[in-house]
Image: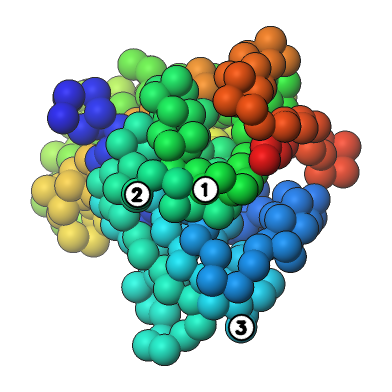
Amino acid sequence: MPDALKLRQAVWSRHWASGAGHSCAGSFGRDYGGEIAAFWRAMHATTPSGACVLDLATGGGAVPRLLLHSRPDLPVDLHAVDLATTAPAWVRERPPGAPGRVTFHGGTRVEALPLRAASVDLVTSQYGIEYAEVDAALDEVLRVRAPRGRIAFVLHHAESRPVRLAAIELAHLAMLLGPDGLVAACAAMLRPMAQAATREGRARLAQDSTAHAARQAFNAAQSAVTARGRAQPDGADVLGEAQDAAAQLLALAGQRGEAVAHDAHARWLQHLQDARLRLEELRRCALDAPALQGWVQRLQRHGLKVETATLAEGPHLMGWTLLAA
């Protein structure tokens, strides 16, 4: 597996292992609802008994879980594929004998599906297949689709709320992760905070110009984050969460020492770097109208009838829908 793919697998595996319901979990609720859920319920309402259903890039398994919740007595053979290696908790915790068989195929690329040709009655994906190598992924969809099988996708729209919010959050992350940002300023404060836990340490700090400079830099970084959040409240959750994390790390340094706090800081840094990669991928894979038309034409060349539409939640454009049969 190429290094870039290994990195993606590790980042997304950590994300889904955290219990996130979908790829925008920091900006939206745990599971999508409203019109997105209504779209999938309409698809699931016509899924026949005994159908083989395949969800691509399933992530937290929002689409398969909705099928099982909306039609709890329906016997289906449900396959969920993801590059991430950890199955969603709800899959692992399903009681024995529950209607419908769920198989999670972890560590699996959409471009190389582990299913027989012409075996799938419904292929679904929600904000997933567009992250793959599209030509190879669509070839696999067409290979496994049964002769009368259906295809249903919810895809990122280049002008959608998630994509616009991703751009804002990436700018926030660039500030936090910059050389004068809160992440670096927090790291420099861990030693002074650990020292301040003892009388002797506090006495040394009183004469420590480096610690004094670190405190000033930290206060300046905190003030800059607060000002940015007030000026740009959209997507500011990432800023407030960063301030909370920094405060917790400084408290940890005082309570448990510098080494423990540095380990926790490294995990926080990785969390933010992971978020940056996911947001960059989201923006990169979002489809404008010409790109979507390329998908449509490819499917039409194989004799499928294709319908597309936009999907909105209230005032917010959320994506494209694509139906093919």
Residue 265 in picture, x, y percent from top left: 26, 43
Residue that label 1 marks: 146
Quadrant housing the N terminus: top left
Front residue of 19/187: it is: 19
Q: Residues under labels 1 and 2: Cα distance?
A: 10 Å
Quadrant housing the C terminus: top right
Q: In this view, does 234 lie above or below 298?
A: below
- Is residue 191 visible to the viewer in this orientation of the structure? yes
**Secondary element at image label 1:** strand
- In primary-sequence order, the first of circles 3 and 2 is 3
Disc 2 crowd, CA 10 A, few/some/many (<14, 14-19, 20+): few
Q: Is residue 54 left or right of residue 312?
A: left
Residue that label 2 marks: 116
- In primary-sequence order, the first of circles 3 and 1 is 3
Front residue of 311/164: it is: 311
Q: Residues under labels 3 and 2: Cα distance?
A: 26 Å
Q: Residues under labels 3 and 1: Cα distance?
A: 23 Å
Name the residue at 19% across, 44% down: 262
Residue that label 3 marks: 73
Q: Is residue 157 left or right of residue 270?
A: right
- In primary-sequence order, the first of circles 1 and 2 is 2
Residue 77 in picture, x, y percent from top left: 46, 67
Residue 124 in picture, x, y percent from top left: 56, 47
**Secondary element at image label 2:** loop
Q: Is residue 254 above or below residue 293?
A: below
Q: What residue type is labelled 2?
A: Arg
**Secondary element at image label 3:** loop
Q: How many marks?
A: 3
Q: What residue type is labelled 1?
A: Ala
